[in-house]
Image (cartoon, grey):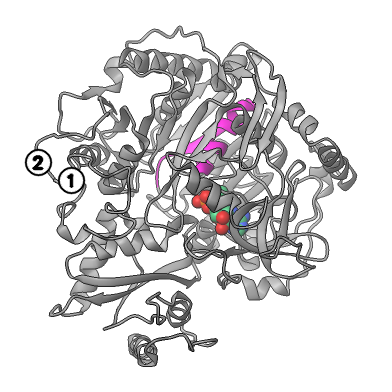
Amino acid sequence: MSDGPKTVAEGGHAIESVLTETRTFPPPAAFAAASLVGSEAAYAAMVEKAEGDHEGFWAEQAGQLEWAAKWTRTLEWTAPDAKWFVGGRLNATASCLDRHAASWRKNKAALLFEGEPGDTRVLTYGQLHREVCKAANALGALGVRAGDFVAIYLPMIPEAVVAMLACARIGAPHTIVFGGFSAEALSDRIKDSRAKLVITADGGWRRGAIVPLKDNVDKALVGTGSADGGSPANAGVPGRAGGSPANAGVPGRDGGSPANAGVPGVERVLVVKRTGNAVAWGPKDVWWHDVVGTASARHVAPSFDSEHPLFSLYTSGTTGKPKGILHTTGGYLTGAAYTSKYVFDLRDDDVFWCTADIGWVTGHSYVVYGPLANGATVLMYEGAPDAPTKSRFWEIIERWGVTVFYTAPTAIRAFMRWGDEHPAAHDLSSLRLLGSVGEPINPEAWMWYRDKIGGARCPIVDTWWQTETGAIMIAPLPGATTTKPGSATRALPGIAADVVKKDGTPCGPNEGGFLVIKRPWPSMLRTIFGDHERFAKTYFGEIEGVYFAGDGARKDADGYFWIMGRVDDVINVAGHRLSTMEVESALASHPKVAEAAVVGRPDDLKGQAIVAFVTPRAGVTADDALATELRAHVTTQIGALARPEEVRFADALPKTRSGKIMRRLLREVASGSTARGDTTTLEDQGVLETLAQAYASDD
Ligand code: WT7
């Protein structure tokens, strides 16, 4: 983080209302009676056990997994470095597949898949096990060895799950890149992870159109993710190509050579046929059906050290360069399995649907590793919630009898907007539990979710966690915890969360402060791939001795957490994490841009929306056409998820005398409030007036 935690930021639209929220919802008696942890006393006993014997508690959770060799020490901790289940050996897929395929669950559905066009597939544990064994053999035949990184850029199809688990099975860490990222963003991630193989598809379905995944991989590998990828305007933009040592000197990027100079290290591209559209074919390309389809289904799972890397996943930090969050095997799987079991109260007859894409950590932990480790039935849907109609999700719930549904507040707010008639027209009585993740949920959306989707019968688990934490940290246990709309309630047993001041001292009730975790937990990140120093500084360097999450929060008199949003230069748009600097770098790489500053402003639907303040180069006309061009440019550089909602032009940006852009002022301008607070360090007082005027005339 550039200049350390600031005061707790304006946490978005939800804050005013949650301060006055007083409604409480005890677990319904019938739910509690049938649940794993069915009372406040049972929850308290679990917490007490975990606090009294932290390592013993986690050892017990890890004991639920399948180990090839038991660990000799539960934890080695020298901040910021944790090793969990030291000396233990396991294969993640033995817990997720082999043990179920060797039990009565062999013919139980592991995956229920529905494609956007309406095609369906069901894979039992026996079948999924066989597919993963075949893919593991195929990867081996393609030269992938334990420790090699594999990049995955796939739609939400069963092969995505098979690919992840096949990587895990042979000890090749996967790095999944969300299919909505552009070729340019994909290229950066492939290079930074040093992936040896890329697994993709010809395309994926999205609102009836084909997402050209293979084309994007081709562009990413040549290093010309966009037409202007090699533009000299990129030079010297801090944090982008210039500031990233990992990218430095990579041929085929800045050169933009049309010949397949290639991203070094990528030897093969494995392509699943999904949409059947024509794709370019090169010497590195192999079809999935040719190599996986013909591979042997016999594969003995080797065992790996508990601390063997399982995956890395890129997420945005406060700089222009995304961080490769690295998770390891034993600890991560323990966290994913434990939280899936207790937060979702998983039972063998559940049909569990987490709507997240596997490109996000939620998809890793709650579409794949957590539920499968528990032998659950997982539903997977490929497409958009409004394709072909706004009833698609409710049709899916009715069709498959979904019992546990886990989605994001942005989606819930969109459903509210679309109208009650859509869920009302469907039988949602199979549902017994609802979940929310990714951003603060405002009480209005929480109540709508409870009433219109849950029929006022299903508890809601609002789950706070991060890519870095690997698994849910703060959430209700649905059979025990009385919920309050807008609060993620309390830390799970085994998780030492608190709200503190900058000096580390605890905040009083309802006093806003920084959310921290005071003790190591098994599924915590181990490093930022290739930058251990940044890892240590970002997470353990801000507040003495504890993990700093980057979120502001308060705890109420009952000890319930109310998350207030990010306190750094990270914005959360529709539950997707973006760095303001990443978007600024993308804008600054456009030849018509002299300078750009990006902030988030509260948005009723997406939580936050991106507003870009841009100073064009001399002689460039600032008009609607330029705004459109810049928005498109960000889409090419990062992906549509980072496209600014609004672009505002100004001859200058508000800066301090030392030249730092005063984002706080921009945030205030962007959200329509007149700039308050301290402006004494502002260099040119006139600048602010121009920006405010621009806003007034826009509106
Ligand atoms: C950030 C992490 C964890 C999976 C999805 C996002 C925000 C996440 C909540 C919640 C309020 C939340 C935080 C956090 N966040 N869940 N229940 N209530 N805020 O993962 O991309 O790593 O983002 O999302 O700001 O730091 P991520």
Q: Position of residue 479 (x, y in %)?
A: 79, 45
Q: Is residue 114 left or right of residue 20?
A: left
Placement of 79 over or under 680, stated as above or below: above
The residue depicted at 66 percent of the width and 38 percent of the height is 78
Mark 2 sits near ligand 1, with its Cβ under 8 Å away: no
Mark 2 touches mark 1? (CB < 8 Å): yes
Q: Label 1 is placed on what type of residue?
A: Thr
Q: Position of residue 646 (x, y in %)?
A: 34, 73
In-front residue for pair 371/390: 371
Which residue is identified by label 1? 224
In-front residue for pair 380/292: 292
Q: Quadrant of the C terminus?
A: bottom left
Residue 426 visible at all: no
Quadrant for ligand 1 reads bottom right
Residue 74 sits in quarter: top right
Q: Is residue 551 left or right of residue 635?
A: right
Q: CA distance from mark 2 to mark 1?
A: 8 Å
Which of the two discs, 2 and 1, labels the residue nearer the N terminus? 1
Q: Which mark, residue 258?
A: 2
Tell me which segment is drawn in magenta: 361-383
